[in-house]
Image (tube, rainbow, N blue to C red):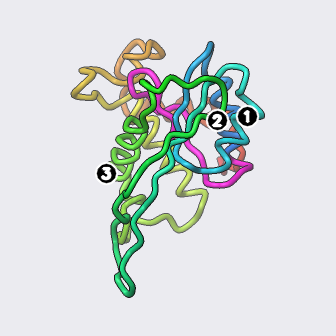
Amino acid sequence: MTVVDASVAIRWLLPDQASTDVFIEGLRLATAGQFQIMTDGFAPYRSAISNILSDRVDLAQLIKVYRASPEGEHRYSPADVVSTEVVPCVGRPDPERNCTSHVERQNLTIRMGLRRFTRLTNAFSKTFKNHCAAIMVWVAFYNFCGVHRSLRTTPAMASGIADHIWSVREPVFLQSACFAGWPYPIAH
């Protein structure tokens, strides 16, 4: 998930190189000017950003080293982080701005708001298409319909891309815009 000014979620991706390339191309089209990106150690980010966005971005990756679980111990939560290392990858990333907490908070918000991402749940999607549609509906609601306590408005209004709080019905009428550039088949 990409989070920029005022916590607007503008893109999300599936974990492989091809979808990461599509994701970064969409990010290129959705942004302007020079900016900094901080990612986790997911390898496809580095090559996609180097190939598609390197002329406008400074990239650093935050690599986390986790403690190994003791033999035979099964966990439902991630292992403890032992150390972190910031690796500059593209351009000259500002060390003062190296942080993944915004996107980590966004991921928590998604897991809490869209129970399909919660571990050990029965709120799963039966098909990939349904899963993608559920994510798109949630992201549209999050950005345009839901007033955030910290912003006192929607992220879309705070970023200047909407002029009012949308009703839940409004995103339905913009379905074609929501699916523009979507690389997966959508049934109408």
Dot 2: few (<14), some (14–19), or many (≥20) neighbours within 10 Å? some
Q: Is 103 above or below relative to 67?
A: above
- Which residue position holds label 2? 89
- Categorize mark 3 by other alpha carbons within 10 Å: few (<14), some (14-19), many (20+): few
Q: Residue furthest right?
A: 51
Secondary element at tag 1:
helix
Q: Which comes sooner in the sequence, label 3 or label 2?
A: 2
The kind of secondary structure element at disc 2 is strand
> Where does the magenta region start and end?
1-19
**Pick the front one: 1 or 73:** 73
- Residue 110: horizontal and vertical position, in percent? 38, 47
| Left or right, residue 43 beside residue 61 | right
Q: Which residue is mark 3?
A: 112
Q: Earlier in the sequence, mark 3 or mark 1?
A: 1
Please give the name of the residue rendered at 60% of the width and 31% of the height, measured from the top-left corner: 59
Q: In the image, what residue type sits under mark 3?
A: Met
Q: Quadrant of residue 29?
A: top right
Marks 3/2: CA–CA distance = 32 Å
Classed neighbour count for the residue bearing mark 1: other residues with Cα under 10 Å, few (<14), some (14–19), many (≥20): some
Q: Where's residue 173, x and y in %?
A: 53, 30
Q: Which residue is mark 1?
A: 50
Amino acid type, residue under disc 1 in the picture: Ser
Measuring from the top left, give residue 84's x and y in whole percent: 43, 48
Residue 108 falls within the magenta-colored stretch? no
Disc 2 marks which amino acid? Cys
